[in-house]
Amino acid sequence: MPDDLTDVLEEWKCLEEEYQKIQETHRQYLQKLDEISKLQNNCSTSISRQQKRLKDISVQVKHCSNGPSEDFRSLNEIKEKIKTRSNAFFEMEAFLPKKNGLYLNLVLGNVNVTLLSKQSKFAYKDEYEKFKLCATVALLLFSFMCYFFVNHRVFDAILNFLLLCYYCTLTIRESVLITNGSRIKGWWVFHHYISAFLSGVMLTWPDGSLYKAFRNQFLAYSLYQSFVQCLQCYYQSGCLYRLRALGERHNMDLTVEGFQSWMWKGLTFLLPFLFFGHFWQLVNGFCLFRMALLSDLSEWQVLMCGLCFLILFMGNFFTTVAVVRQKLKSRNQKPKNL
C-alpha cells in the first residue's frame, strides 16, 4: 500500500474518532440545555408563586398592625424581610428568560433577549456606554460642522437622521438592558422616545422660510446638548464605577441625560449646565409656537416640534427639581438621625 494512502487512512481514522467525540459532546450539551430550560421554568413558576403569597401576607400584616408592641416588632421584621425578598427576586429574575415588553415585541418580535451570565450582561452594558459616548462625540462634531461651516439642507437632514438613528438605537438597547436587570426607568426612558420623535419631525420639515428662521437656533441647541451629554457620560461613568466598587450602586446602573440622587457628590457642577439646557428647550418651544401662530399653521412640523420641546422641558425640569429636592431632604434628615 502506498505511503500516501496510508497517511490518508490514518488521518481519516483520527477524524472519525474526533467526530464521534464531537457528537457525544453536542449530545451532552443539548441534554444540559434541556435541563437548564426545565430549571428556568421551575424557578420562574416558584418565584411567581412566592411573589403572589408575599402580596397576600403584606395585606395581612397591614391588618394586624394595631396589635401589642411585641407583635408590632415582629410585624416590622416581617415587613423588612418582605422588602429584601422582593429585591432578591428582582436579582433572580434578571437571570431568567422573560417576556419582552410591547416595544421590544414590536421591534424584535418574540425573541429571548435575556443574557444568562453576569459577564455577558456587563459586557453588553459597557458596550452600550461606549456606543453612547462615541455617538455623542460624533453628533457634537457634526453639529459643529453644520453650524459653523456648512449651510445646506442635505447636511441638516443627515444630522437629523443620525439623531433619529441614535435615539431609536438607545431605546432598543435600553429595553434590552431593562430586561436584563437595569434599573433605569421613568422619565429617563420616555425622554428618548420623545427625542426620537422630534428628530423624525425635524427630518421631514421642508426647507422653507420657517425652517431657515429656526435652523441656527436648533443647531446651536444640538451642539450644546451634545457637549453636555459628553460631560455627563464622562463624569457619571467615573462616579458609577467608584460607587459600584463601594457596593453603593447596582452593577447594571447606567449613565443618563439628567441628574439623579447618586450624583450629588462631585457632580453638582453639572446642574447649571442641565438647567440652562432645560430652559433652552422652553425657549425653543415658545419660539416655535410663536412661529406657528404667525404662519397660520402652514407647516405642521412647527407645531409638533414646539410641543416636543415643551414636553422635554417639563419632563427634564420637574424630574431634576424633584431629584434635587429629595436629595436635599435626605441630607437634612441625616444629622437628625445621628
Image: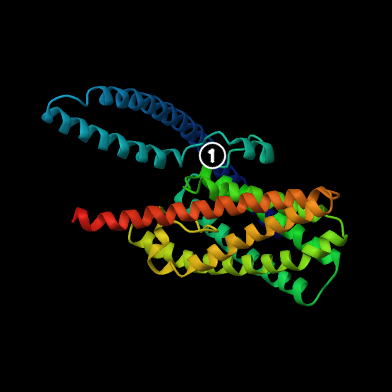
Q: Does residue 54 appear to the left or right of 14 in the view shown?
A: left
Q: Nearer the viewer, residue 195 or 280?
A: 280
The residue at the point 82 percent across, 60 percent down is: 211
Q: Is residue 174 above or below residue 68?
A: below
Image coords of residue 309 (percent x, y): 66, 54
Q: Is residue 1 visible?
A: no
Left of 253 or right of it: where is 110?
right
Looking at the image, the residue that sits furthest to the front is: 294
Q: Nearer the viewer, residue 223 or 169?
A: 223
Residue 204 as seen in the image, left or right of residue 106: right
How many circles with numbers are drawn on the protein?
1
Q: Residue at x 48, y 48 (%)?
A: 182
Q: Whole-percent x and y of residue 167?
A: 66, 54
**Residue 84 located left or right of residue 189:** left
The crowding category of the residue bearing disc 1, from other C-alpha atoms within 10 Å (few below 14, some 14 to 19, many at least 20), is few
Q: Residue at x 44, y 38 (%)?
A: 93
Which residue occupies the extreme bottom position in the image? 149
Residue placed under numbered mark 1 in the picture: 24
Q: Residue at x 21, y 34 (%)?
A: 76
Which percent across, then down, holds residue 13?
62, 48
Image quarter of residue 330: bottom left
Secondary element at tag 1: helix
Amino acid type of the residue tagged 1 in the rendering: Glu
Q: Can you give x and y, in whole percent of width and height, for residue 96 in the image? A: 47, 37
Decide which of 11, 281 is in the foreground and name it.
Answer: 281
